[in-house]
Every structure is written in C-alpha cells, then in structure tokens.
C-alpha cells in the first residue's frame, strides 16, 4: 500500500471514530490528556479540528507549547479482530475566526456549545499532523508528513 493510500485509509478511519484523546504539555512539563470529539473533521492531508473554550488548560498548554499528541482507537472488527490504533504527533494552532468556525461546524457540537459558532470564548484547534503511527490487523506503520 502506498503512503497516499495509507494516509487516505487512516484519514477515512479517523472520521468514523468520534472521540480521541488530545495530549498537551503542562507548564510543569507533564502530559495532560483529555477526550475530544473530532466530529468527522479529519482530512486527507492529516489535519484535524476540535472546539474548546479559551479559558481551558488545553488552550493555555498550546499557547506555551503547540506540539500535541492525538490517539484514536477504532471498533473491534466483525470477526473479533483487534481494533485500529492511531497515534498522531502534530502542531496545534489556535483559531479564533468565526468564519473558520462556521466552515468546520457540525450539528453535534451544539450539545457542548449552545450558541453554535457564536458561543462566547470559543476557540477552534487546528491540528496539523507531522507523524502518524498506526497498528492494525493488516499491519503497522508510520507516515511522516
């Protein structure tokens, strides 16, 4: 399988996994991880998008150190095969542009952000993958972007 095919497979797979774990570095250098919904917002180039509030530890950590990690675990296969595991290393950008919010908004976000893209204090995290590791019943590998 070529790198492009592997990247497309991983991107398509990540779209079907609603929640992953986002890890940042705290001020003390420790890891802080929290569940985040990707809302199917993963593209073939390795970009992921998440929404949070400006006053969170997540945003403070990213301001200090934009290097982040994402992990995703897929469902067990139909024959009980192990799930797909994905680990992403990347750089986070804090986006505060409401037009960008609207472009990446999905209906499911309304349960956390009642005023939609107009929610006060809303921030979008744009994660650009630099390296993706994966483990799957068909094999394992690494993609550097």
Image (cartoon, rainbow, N blue to C red):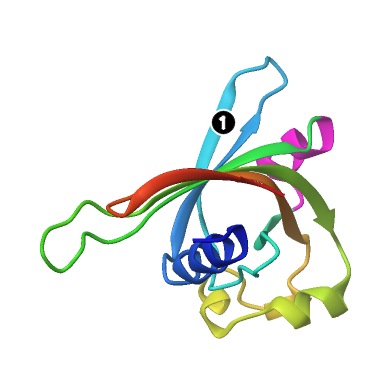
Using the rendered view, name the quadrant where residue 22 is placed.
top right
Please tell me whether the stretch drawn in magenta is mainly helix, strand or loop: helix
| Location of residue 115 in the rendering, given as x and y in whole percent from the top left corner | 68, 79
| Location of residue 63 in the rendering, given as x and y in whole percent from the top left corner | 83, 37
Query: Seen in the image, is 76 located left or right of residue 106?
Result: left
Q: Residue at x 51, y 74 (%)?
A: 111
| Location of residue 65 in the rendering, given as x and y in whole percent from the top left corner | 79, 31
The answer to which of 49 and 84 lies nearer the viewer is 84
Residue 133 seen by the camera = no
Q: Secondary structure at mark 1?
A: strand
Residue pushed farthest front?
1
The answer to which of 54 and 47 lies nearer the viewer is 47
Query: Seen in the image, is 18 located left or right of residue 48?
Result: left
Residue 103 seen by the camera = yes
Q: Is residue 55 magenta?
A: yes
Query: Seen in the image, is 82 located left or right of residue 97?
Result: left
| Location of residue 143 in the rendering, given as x and y in whole percent from the top left corner | 60, 47
The residue that mark 1 highlights is: 32
Query: Seen in the image, is 92 located left or right of residue 29?
Result: right
Up-down relation of residue 140 to residue 16 (above or below): above
Q: Is residue 129 magenta?
A: no
Q: Residue at x 70, y 55 (%)?
A: 53
Q: Where does the magenta region start and end?
A: 54-64
The answer to which of 71 and 55 lies nearer the viewer is 71
């Amino acid at each position: 399988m070529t790198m492009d095919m592997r990247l497309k497979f991983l991107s398509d797979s990540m779209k079907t996994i609603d929640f992953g774990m986002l890890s940042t570095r705290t001020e003390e250098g420790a890891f802080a991880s929290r569940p985040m919904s990707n809302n199917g917002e993963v593209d073939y180039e390795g970009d992921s998008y998440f929404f949070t509030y400006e006053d969170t530890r997540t945003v403070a950590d990213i301001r200090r150190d934009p290097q982040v990690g994402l992990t995703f675990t897929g469902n067990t296969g139909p024959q009980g095969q192990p799930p797909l595991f994905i680990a992403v290393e990347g750089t986070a950008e804090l986006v505060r542009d409401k037009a960008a919010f609207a472009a990446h908004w999905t209906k499911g976000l309304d349960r956390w952000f009642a005023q939609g893209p107009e929610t006060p204090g809303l921030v979008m995290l744009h994660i650009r993958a630099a390296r993706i590791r994966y483990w799957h019943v068909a094999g394992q590998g690494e993609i550097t972007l």
